[in-house]
Amino acid sequence: PQAVVPKKGGKTQKKISHKFIINCKLPIEDNIIVLADFENFLKTHIKVQNKKGNLGTNVTVAKEGSNLVVNASITFSKRYLKYLTKKFLKKNKLRDWLRVIANAKDSYELRYFNIDQDEDAEEE
């Protein structure tokens, strides 16, 4: 039998940790979005290893006030979170009134389109 030789220069991988925040303050105050529904949508639609709802301990979705916090211990794209947020808005027919804006490196915010400015410009 062959002896097991330890590998030279065994590298340790850095622990990956991503924390993304989605601020839903404005739509929640106006009772347009129910945060629990949005949370359930993300839990069922986030794909881990090409399977929906396969979050396990790798990805957690939690409510903090009027924010949703997504913690991931695997590689996770902020852009993917924006895609899912837009998909949720489209499903609830809110895409015409709300948009997803990055307000920091690790967070998004749901804001209304500025319709008033367009109407003022047409009147002048």
Image (cartoon, rainbow, N blue to C red):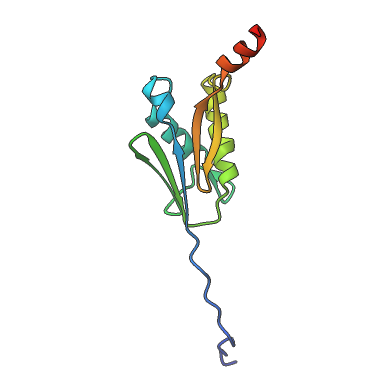
* Residue sitting at the far top: 123
Q: Residue at x 39, y 25 (%)?
A: 28
Q: Quadrant of residue 27?
A: top left
Say which of 57 and 103 sits in front: 103
Q: In the image, residue 86 lies at what x, y percent?
A: 57, 31
Q: Is residue 51 above or below residue 119?
A: below
Q: Residue at x 57, y 92 (%)?
A: 3
Say which of 49 and 15 sits in front: 15
Q: Is residue 95 above or below residue 4?
A: above
* Residue sitting at the far left: 65
Placement of the N terminus among the 4 image quadrants: bottom right
Placement of the C terminus among the 4 image quadrants: top right
Q: Residue at x 47, y 58 (%)?
A: 17
For residue 55, side relative to residue 5 (left or right):
left
Q: Is residue 13 above or below residue 106?
A: below
Q: In the image, residue 73 lies at what x, y percent?
A: 47, 57
Say which of 20 and 60 sits in front: 20
Say which of 79 and 56 sits in front: 79
Q: In the image, residue 21 lies at what x, y percent?
A: 45, 43
Give the number of callouts: 0
